[in-house]
Image (cartoon, helix red, strand yellow):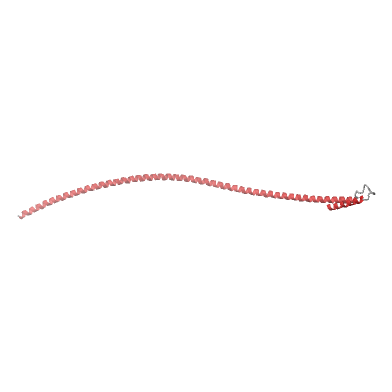
């Protein structure tokens, strides 16, 4: 369309030169176009402006389409960003909930274990006290038994000594009595034998 308009201008420029060679006929109206030419010029300008408007409209449409595409992408990106933020928020919330739940569980377990440890420590202390008392009682009993054993042993030794002394004395007395009895028996037997001999001798004479 621009080319067509330029061609027309060049054509009209050529005509102007031709008319300039004939200066004697018309002086004021040689450069004015006739209605047909003017109509052609106006039509060419209209077509040029229309083409220019179409091109500008196409550019505006492309720009608007690009803007719409940009907005659409921005909306998609915002939506994806929001979805990602929501997903991250849900993950963080779930992890926080799990952490709190696990922390509370471990805290309760730690408290329970500490209570059990305290209770076991009390039991251990009681058992240690009881063991110490039993050990002390055992030592006291063993001491008493040892004293009793030593006492009984001394009594046995004393009784054995007394019995040995008494037995020795008794044996000595018995030996003395036996010796005295033997002596008396011998004396009596000798006297009897002497009397018997004497009687026998008298009968013989």
Q: Give the residue drawn at x 6%, y 54%.
A: 201
- Furthest residue to the right? 25
Q: Is residue 73 left or right of residue 178?
A: right
Q: Nearer the viewer, residue 101 or 37?
A: 37
Q: Position of residue 105 (x, y in %)?
A: 55, 47
Q: Is residue 55 visible?
A: yes
Q: Give the residue drawn at x 47%, y 45%.
A: 121
Q: Is residue 165 left or right of residue 193?
A: right
| Picture quadrant where residue 143 is located | top left
Q: Position of residue 129 (x, y in %)?
A: 43, 44
Q: Give the residue drawn at x 14%, y 51%.
A: 186
Q: Nearer the viewer, residue 96 or 189?
A: 96
Looking at the figure, which quarter contains the C terminus?
bottom left
Q: Position of residue 140 (x, y in %)?
A: 37, 44
Q: Is residue 1 visible?
A: no
- Furthest residue to the front? 21
Q: Position of residue 19 (x, y in %)?
A: 92, 50
| Picture quadrant where residue 154 is located | top left
> How many marks can you see?
0
Q: Give the residue drawn at x 45%, y 45%.
A: 124
Q: Nearer the viewer, residue 111 or 46?
A: 46
Q: Nearer the viewer, residue 167 or 202?
A: 167
- Furthest residue to the bottom? 204
């Amino acid at each position: 369309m621009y080319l067509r308009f330029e061609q027309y201008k060049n054509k009209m420029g050529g005509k102007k030169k031709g008319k300039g060679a004939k200066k004697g006929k018309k002086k004021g109206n040689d450069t004015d176009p006739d209605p047909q030419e003017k109509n052609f010029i106006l039509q060419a300008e209209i077509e040029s402006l229309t083409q220019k408007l179409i091109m500008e409209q196409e550019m505006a449409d492309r720009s608007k389409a690009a803007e719409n595409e940009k907005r659409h992408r921005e909306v998609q990106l915002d939506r994806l960003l929001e979805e990602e933020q929501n997903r991250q928020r849900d993950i963080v919330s779930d992890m926080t909930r799990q952490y709190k739940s696990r922390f509370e569980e471990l805290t309760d377990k730690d408290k329970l274990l500490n209570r059990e440890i305290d209770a076991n420590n009390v039991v251990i202390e009681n058992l240690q006290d009881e063991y110490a008392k039993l050990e002390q009682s055992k030592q006291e009993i063993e001491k008493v038994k040892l004293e009793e054993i030593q006492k009984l042993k001394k009594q046995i030794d004393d009784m054995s000594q007394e019995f040995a002394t008494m037995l020795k004395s008794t044996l000595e007395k018995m030996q003395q009595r036996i010796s005295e009895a033997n002596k008396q028996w011998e004396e009596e037997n000798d006297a009897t034998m002497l009397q018997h001999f004497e009687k026998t001798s008298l009968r013989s004479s």
